[in-house]
Amino acid sequence: MNAPRPAEQTAAPAPARAKAAPAPLAGAPSVRAGTEDPGRRERLLGLVQRQGVLAVLLAVILVASLLYPSFATLDNARGVTVQASFLAIVALGMTLVIITGGIDLSVGSVFALGGVLAAWASPWGLLPALLVPLLVCGGIGLVNGLLIGRAGLAPFIVTLATLLGARGLLLAFTDEGATTYLVPKDSAFSWLGGGTVWGFGVPLFLALALFGGGGLLLQRTPFGQGLFAVGGSSDAATLMGLPVARTKVLVYTLSGLLAGFAGALNAARLHSGVTILGVGMELDAISAVVIGGTLLIGGAGSVSGTLWGVLLLAVIQNLINQIGSLNSSYQSVVSGGFLVVVVVAQRYLARGRRST
């Protein structure tokens, strides 16, 4: 008997088709609709990380205004903002450095050196008083950038060395602090530090202009976006074709320029180059940047958050002065407490964003 051809083979009976599931009732909530949108949660956590310090700043201002009527005065606001302007300019450069995953410990010494050099050059006019500190302090920042970006040395070690070097250069230039250079009080350079516009000090408007430029640099230019990429992962940024070494050189140079410029403005305000200034200023700048939401590990941050962080530290200092029974050393205690809280909060916020 011949075997049947494949076309004549009988197939096994097909199983009965399952009945279609009933359609959900109208208006019944779906499981997906009840779950939280991961993207929305990540955006919310990112907003809290970047701008949460603004809410804290407004709360402190509100409480201080209710407790101390002299705090909520225009004269007090003028004093607080002008005093905060110099730290803000230094912290702006520190923000760019930390976003790339680095650190700059030399800004305090560079700030003091810039003030002395500006006072020394001020008798020759406005341009020498600005150009001399910018060239020298920018050169120190350039050295930092070359050693870190090109030679691959650790930022902590390099900037610690330039901190000591800039302070030593300052002492040598002033005969161990025995020589104090004065700024002519009727000069245009003096007006940059002590002049007023609409009742507020000129340094405040210069700081705001620099922060506006810094914000545009970070958010609207390829260079600014490259800073976040370098801070996120230098290896990945290199594979993407970004000039990692050149980026680091530029940010450290900018940090030195801004620190020197802030020192020059402070000398114009004080009408002299004071050698003892700037000690510990690098720690205040780092605190303001971190409190403002910039991650110490790099890759995330904003200049607006740094501005709120600087103002928060300035308001705390002013509030301590309003109390009267506390000395200025309590500012370090309060600032340190804020810093610990912010770092812990950043850790949990970053963990929450990774889990989305």
Image (cartoon, helix red, strand yellow):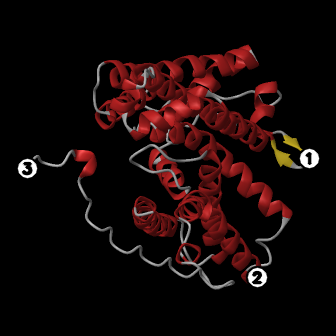
- Name the residue beneath numbered marker 1: 198
Describe the element under mark 2 as helix, strand or loop: helix
Residue 262 location in percent, x, y?
A: 62, 35
- Name the residue beneath numbered marker 2: 66
Q: Nearer the viewer, residue 284 or 54?
A: 54
In front of the other: label 1 or label 3? Answer: 3
Residue 290 location in percent, x, y?
A: 49, 54
Give the amino acid at mark 2.
Answer: Leu
Give the amino acid at mark 3.
Answer: Met
Q: Is residue 355 left or right of residue 271?
A: left
- Contact (CB < 8 A) between labels 2 and 3? no
Describe the element under mark 1 as helix, strand or loop: loop
Q: Is residue 329 above or below residue 237?
A: below
Q: Residue at x 61, y 53 (%)?
A: 305
Q: Nearer the viewer, residue 175 or 191?
A: 191
Residue 123 location in percent, x, y?
A: 71, 18
Give the amino acid at mark 1.
Answer: Trp
Q: Nearer the viewer, residue 294 or 354?
A: 354
Q: Is residue 236 left or right of residue 337?
A: left
